Image: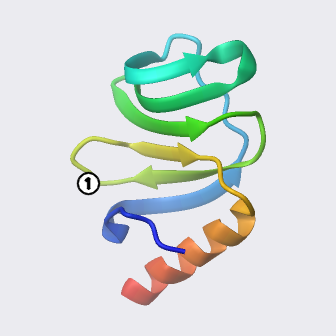
Amino acid sequence: MIIDHPYPTIKSVQVDYFDAPMWMLRMPGTSIAPLHIYEGSFKYANKWYFLSYKKREPLVILELEGHEKYTYVIFQIDHPTEVASALRKRIRELD
């Protein structure tokens, strides 16, 4: 698995459900809240989120620190627990 993101900015990796706040602003992004579809950049409480998911299920949630824009990257992927584990392992290897 390869992600195109600077690993040193990843503060934490978890797998959980995510419910986008109702007042989250799309900038730019697509959202169909009743169907739990979110794609793109969103801003809420002065923090930037990159969301990419199409249904309510466990998602990979990356909390970032020191990234030029985003505080959170949240995405849907097959086998999220295994992906999160692989990311954590890669981050430890780089420390």
Which of these two is toward me, 25 or 66?
Answer: 25
User: Is residue 55 depicted above or below 72 in this figure?
Assistant: above
User: Is residue 4 depicted above or below 67 in this figure?
Assistant: below
* Residue beneath the point at 72% across and 59% down: 78
User: Is residue 56 depicted above or below 60 in this figure?
Assistant: above
Which of these two is toward me, 92 or 54?
Answer: 54
Q: How many residues crowd around disc 1 within 10 Å: few (fewer than 14), some, or many (20 or more)?
A: few
Q: Is residue 61 left or right of residue 29?
A: right
User: Is residue 7 depicted above or below 18 in this figure?
Assistant: below
Which residue is identified by label 1? Answer: 66
Q: Position of residue 33 (x, y in %)?
A: 65, 16
Q: Quadrant of residue 42?
A: top left
* Residue beneath the point at 71% across and 48% down: 16
* Residue beneath the point at 35% across and 62% down: 5
Question: What's under tag 1, amino acid-wise?
Answer: Gly
Which of these two is toward me, 45 or 29?
Answer: 29
Q: Position of residue 26 (x, y in %)?
A: 41, 18
Q: Is residue 92 left or right of residue 15?
A: left
Indicate the secondary structure of the residue bearing disc 1.
loop
Q: Is residue 6 left or right of residue 89?
A: left
**Camera sees residue 46:** yes
Q: Position of residue 34 (x, y in %)?
A: 73, 14
Q: Position of residue 49 (x, y in %)?
A: 43, 35
Q: Residue extending furthest top?
A: 23
Q: Quadrant of residue 47?
A: top left
Q: Residue extending furthest right?
A: 57
The quadrant the N terminus occupies is bottom right
The quadrant the C terminus occupies is bottom left
* Residue beneath the point at 63% across and 66% down: 84
